[in-house]
Each structure stands twice: as structure tokens, then as C-alpha cells.
Amino acid sequence: MLLTALSAGCEPRGNDDGQQSKPVHCTVIVDGPKADEKRANFAGRVRYRCATPGAEKLTIKIRLEKQDGEKWRSVATATHTLKGKQTYAAELKYNAKTVSLSCRSGTYRTVVDWSRTSRKDTEGDNLISGSVKDPCRPPLFG
């Protein structure tokens, strides 16, 4: 009995009580552009997770932007609309979506616009990663 109680405490249940009126909480994190292992492509990644039972709808719009002088312009985009269990991730775990490009020089960043709908409440934000110069260039050390 003690083991069951201890293991049940490790997994937050969120707001999965159907009588609950509080919206489901979601966390969204944007990661800067990073090259794949072969250094043939690079991708901007967005990680996300919602408490149980998941959001009614989570919309994630990802852009890779390239710096052009003082301005940033979109060079690749992807939009994902997720519902319910697709938005849920266990404690300390994340789901991820990416947008990628073939390797090329320049300074890039990842931008995400997201919105979550849960129990008649909408929340969202615009997140911008740090910029990365030539994301496919091999590191100097390592």
C-alpha cells in the first residue's frame, strides 16, 4: 500500500477531474536552431507539455527566421494543431515539434506563436530563441 501511495505521488494528475473548472496548464519552450548529427540540416525545436487530461486545443506555429541586416525574415514555417492526449506529457517530459532547413550560412533564430484553449479559457504567447550564427558549423571544441 505504501509503494502505491508513493508512486502515485510522482505523477501529477493535473486537472483531470471532469468537474474541475480550472484550465489545464501548458508549458511551451523554444530552442534555438541546431544542426543534425550529419550537419546536413538544422532545425528549430519547440517543446511542450500540458497537464492531464491535456488541452482541448494547442496550436503551435513555428518559424525559422534569418537575420537580414537589422530585420528578421521567415525562411521556414510549420503549424501544428494538437488536441487532448496529443498535448499531454508526463512530469519532466516534453513532446516536440520542429521546422528544418538544409544547412546554409547566416544567423538564425526560432520563433513560436502558441495558444492553448482549455475549459473556456485561452492563453498564448510569442517566444523567440537566442540567435545562432551558422548553426551547421562544427563546434570549435568538442
Image (spheres, rainbow, N blue to C red):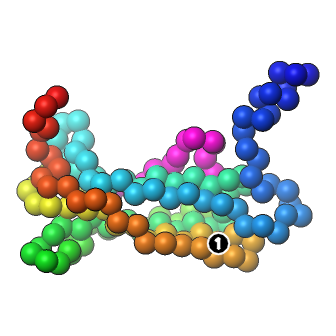
Q: Is residue 17 magenta?
A: no
State the quadrant of the C terminus.
top left
Q: Mark 1 points at which residue?
A: 117
Vertical side of 22 occupied by 10: above or below: above
Residue 45 at x, y = what percent?
37, 53
Query: 6 or 108, which is in the foreground?
Result: 6
Q: Is residue 58 found left or right of 47 in the rendered image?
A: right
Assign the N terminus to one quadrant of the image: top right
- Residue drawn at 62 percent across, 55 percent down: 50
Does 92 appear in magenta?
Answer: yes
**Residue at 63% over, 51% down:** 88
**Rendering coords of residue 90 (x, y %):** 63, 42
Taking the spot 54% from the left edge, 73% from the top edge, the residue there is 124
Give the magenta range: 85-99
Residue 84 in view (yes/no) = no
Nearer to the camera, 54 or 128: 128
Q: Where is residue 28 in the image (x, y as percent from the top left)?
A: 50, 58
Whole-percent x, y for residue 24 in the image: 70, 62
Horizontally, is 114 left or right of 141 in the view?
right
Residue 46 in sight here: yes
Which of the 4 image quadrants contains residue 40? top left
Examine the image and state in which quarter residue 27 appears: bottom right
Q: Badge 1: how crowded within 10 Å, few (<14), some, or many (20+)?
A: many
